[in-house]
């Protein structure tokens, strides 16, 4: 009887770990893209690039949190 329960728990941990890895890779990629953009421009465009990079980082984080919450709610139902 404990087999399915432990299988569900390990499946949830695997999905959580993979989502964490995907989130980390996406955040690093967006951060490097913003850093490269900041290297090539200066002045007000650099500030706009920084703000857009920050907005993209928050968007990536919120999207991945939404995926985790949606997966958790789907598992409960």
Image (spheres, helix red, strand yellow):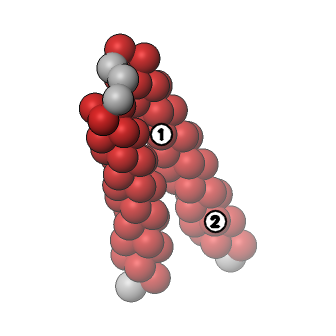
Would you name the residue on which mark 1 appears?
27
The residue lying at 56 percent from left, 48 percent from top is: 20
Q: Give the Cα separation between the discs numbered 1 and 2.
A: 27 Å
Q: Residue 19 carries which label?
A: none
**Residue placed farthest to the top in the image?**
40
**Mark 1 surroundings within 10 Å by alpha-carbon count, few (fewer than 14), some (14 through 19), many (20 or more):** some
Q: Nearer the viewer, mark 1 or mark 2?
A: 1
Direction front: furthest residue: 43
The image position of residue 73, as x and y in percent, is 41, 79
Q: Can residue 26 be seen in this view?
A: no
In the rendered view, tell whether residue 77 sits above or below residue 45. below
Query: Could you say which is closer to the camera, residue 29 or residue 42?
Result: 42
**Position in image of residue 26 (x %, y %):** 43, 37
Where residue 27 appears, as percent x and y from the top left, is 48, 39
Q: Is mark 1 on a helix, strand or loop?
A: helix
User: How many numbered discs?
Assistant: 2
Which residue matches tag 2? 9
Which residue does the image show at 45% across and 25% down from the upper left?
Answer: 35
Give whichever of discs 1 and 2 has the lower sequence position: 2
Residues 48 and 73: in front is 48
Q: For this view, does 64 lie left or right of residue 9?
A: left
Compare residues 4 and 73 and report the one nearer the observer. Answer: 73
């Amino acid at each position: 009887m404990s087999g399915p329960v432990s299988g569900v728990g390990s499946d949830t941990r695997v999905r959580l770990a993979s989502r964490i890895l995907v989130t980390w890779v996406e955040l690093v990629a967006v951060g490097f893209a913003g850093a490269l953009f900041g290297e090539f421009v200066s002045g007000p465009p650099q500030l706009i690039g920084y703000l857009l990079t920050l907005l993209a980082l928050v968007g990536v984080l919120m999207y991945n949190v939404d995926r985790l919450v949606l997966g958790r709610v789907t598992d409960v139902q």
